Structures are given as structure tokens and as C-alpha cells.
Image: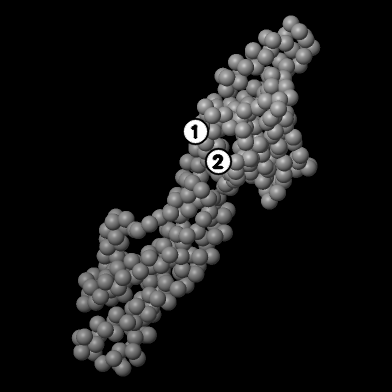
Amino acid sequence: MKNTKGTETRGALPLKFHIYAIIGCLIYTAGFDLLTRGKIFSDVFILTFLLMIVQVELFAWIGGKLLNSLIYNSVQEFIRKVIPRLCVFYFFVVIIAGLLFVGMTAIWSYSNGANLDLFFKQLPEKELRGFIIGSSFGLLIGTVIYFFLELIALIKRIEKTTEEKMRYHYETLKNQLNPHFLFNSLNTLSSIIYKDVTLADHYIVKLSSIYRYILDQHENKLIDLVKELDFVKDYFYLQQLRDEERIHLDINIEQPERYQILPVSLQLLVENALKHNAATTGTPLSIKISGVIDGYISVENNRQPKQQLSGSYQIGLRNLAERVNIITGKELLIEQNNKRFLVKIPITIL
């Protein structure tokens, strides 16, 4: 099965499935013989066994084609998508089972010298009814077992995804507590503390609020967009005290209180833009946060890449993209050319 991007698709059936199928068909055929003929290993035991093997393999293949393409990421979505297809599957395989039984028993009877006209007249009363009832019951059990096995597998996958989310939260937290940022902030603070005590006090408040936000929000999947934007403004304020008119930030989002976003995501994009682009008074770095269009917010900056930096930018974006996909099931969209770099990050509506 698949799950919206950390998704897996089942391929060919494993060898143990075929072994279990043979054992199960032997047990089922013996039980069927005992119930319908009063003995095990009747004269049609081999025929019935072969018929069951053909059915199991054929139905497993049909089920794979019908169900393996489904994508679901929650129990509710699983039930909504799988149950209708299982009902369709069950209806058709019961019909196919009856046709297979008629065809194979007709061939068997003809090869043993039976009259086919008499065979087809006696078939409904002697064989077909019992086989259809038995097959329907067996297929129903198999369908129910399949449903619960898939449900258990989905629950385990959700638990694994939750663990991955927590791991990415933790990694993001460690990445955001950037020692270089703290070092630069303390340097800036030391340069202004004797010049402007009020400004220094304000600076300390902003710096503490940044780290408090990171510590408070690192376990949350989503945060109100208003809070994330306030966090970005505080972060940029500290940067601008050092870089002054060389950097600009423009935020243009209508009704941000209606949305939620991954915590520390916009700040990461702003930080990467500042880290990987040169900025001077003559050619300032401009960062724009805008949206919302089709469920995405855009973070755009003019490209002025620093020559000494290269691969680390992609690592940060890749980590963010994985985190976005795990939590929202959507993609982080990147557009770039020689003049601009733009990242679109998904948001959710409250």
C-alpha cells in the first residue's frame, strides 16, 4: 500500500504466502470433504484442492490489482476507501469461484466418461450449491482477515510515522538552536549595551522570546500562522540591527489568523536566505513572505549567492521538505532562476 509520501507499494506476493495458501487449501478441502461427503480424501479431493489453489492465487492477484493502488494515511480514510473495494472484490470472486467450479468439474466429469447433459442437470442439486456456500463462507473469512491485517499494518505505519515526526521535530530544534546565530547575537548585544541600554534591553527580550518559542513549539505539529510570523519578525529584527539597511523583509498575508503552519518553518527559510546570499547597501537582500494561494505561502528572495557556500542550503531544504511531507502529506515547492529563489510551503485552514 501507499501512504502519501513516505509511502510503500506492495509488489509480488512473498513465497510464504504461497506456502500458507497450499497448507490452508489442504485443510479447507479436507474440512469441506468431511462436511459434504462425510469423509476425508474423497474421489474428488484432488479436484477440489486444485480448484481452491487456483482460486486463492487468482483472487490474491485480483485483490492486489484492485487494492494495492489505494493511498490512505488514516484509519478513517482506510475504511472509506477499502471497504467499498472489498465488497466489489467479494462479489466478483464469488461469481468467478462458481464459474471455475463448473468449468473444472465439467472437465473432470467428461474425462471420466460422464454424460455432460446429465452432469449439468444434476449440478445445481448435487455439487454447485454446496460449493458456492462453502466458497462464499471461506472467501468471506479471507476478506475479513485481509481487512484486519491491513488495518493493523496501517496502525503500525501511523505509529512509525509519528515516531519519524518526533525525530524530525527534534532534529529541527537542534538545527534552529544555531550556535552561530547565538554568537552573532551576543556580539551585537555587546556592541550596543553601552551605547543604548533601552535598545539592549529590548534586544534581550527579543532574543529570549525567540528561544522560548523554539523550546515551546518543537513538539507541536502545527502552530498558528500569526505566532510563526511574530517569531519571524523577532528573528529578523535581531538580524537587521546588525545588517541594518542591507536586508529587508516584507510580509503581505491577509487574515493570517485563519491559518496554521509548521513551527519554525518560515524562520528556517528566512534564515537560509540570509545565510546563503550576500547583502550590501547598494544591493540589499529583499525577502518577501506572501500568500495565500492554493493552500501555500511563498517565501521569495532575490538571488545574490555567496560563493563559498553551496550544499548546506539544499540539506536544510531537504530536511524541511521531509518534515512538511510527513506532517501535512504535501510537497515543498521550489522555483528558482538566476534572479530569484522562491519556496512555497503548505498551510492549513483553521
| Residue under the image location 35 percent in, 91 percent down | 121
Q: Is residue 55 left or right of residue 218?
A: left
Picture colour scheme: one colour
Q: Nearer the viewer, residue 59 or 126?
A: 59
Q: What crowding class fits label 2: few (fewer than 14 Cα within 10 Å), some (14-19), or many (20 or more)?
A: some
Q: How busy is the neighbourhood of tag 1: few (under 14 within 10 Å), some, or many (20 plus)?
A: few
Residue furthest toward the top?
Answer: 194
Question: Image quadrant of residue 98?
Answer: bottom left
Structural distance between the alpha carbons of marks 2 and 1? 15 Å
Q: Is residue 243 above or below residue 314?
A: above
**The disc labelled 1 sits on which kind of residue?**
Gly
Q: Secondary structure at mark 1?
A: helix
Task: Say which residue appears at 53% left-offset and 54% top-offset.
Answer: 72
Q: Mark 2 or 1 closer to N-term?
A: 1
Q: Is residue 141 visible?
A: no
Q: Quadrant of the C terminus?
A: top right
244 on left or right of 65: right
Q: Secondary structure at mark 2?
A: helix
Look at mark 2 in the image and give the residue it sits on.
Answer: 321
Q: Taking 20 as reference, is 242 left or right? A: right
Query: In which quadrant of the rendered view does residue 64 lie?
Result: bottom left
Q: Position of residue 74 (x, y in %)?
A: 55, 50
Quadrant of the image for the N terminus? bottom left
Q: Which mark is residue 42?
A: none
- Indicate the quadrant where residue 268 lies: top right
Q: Badge 1 is on which residue? A: 311
Asked if one can make out residue 68 in the rendered structure from this viewpoint, the answer is: yes
Give how far across and how far down residue 299 sits, in percent: 66, 39
Where is residue 224 shown, x and y percent of the image? 70, 37
Q: Determine the residue positioned at 71% across, 15% down.
A: 204
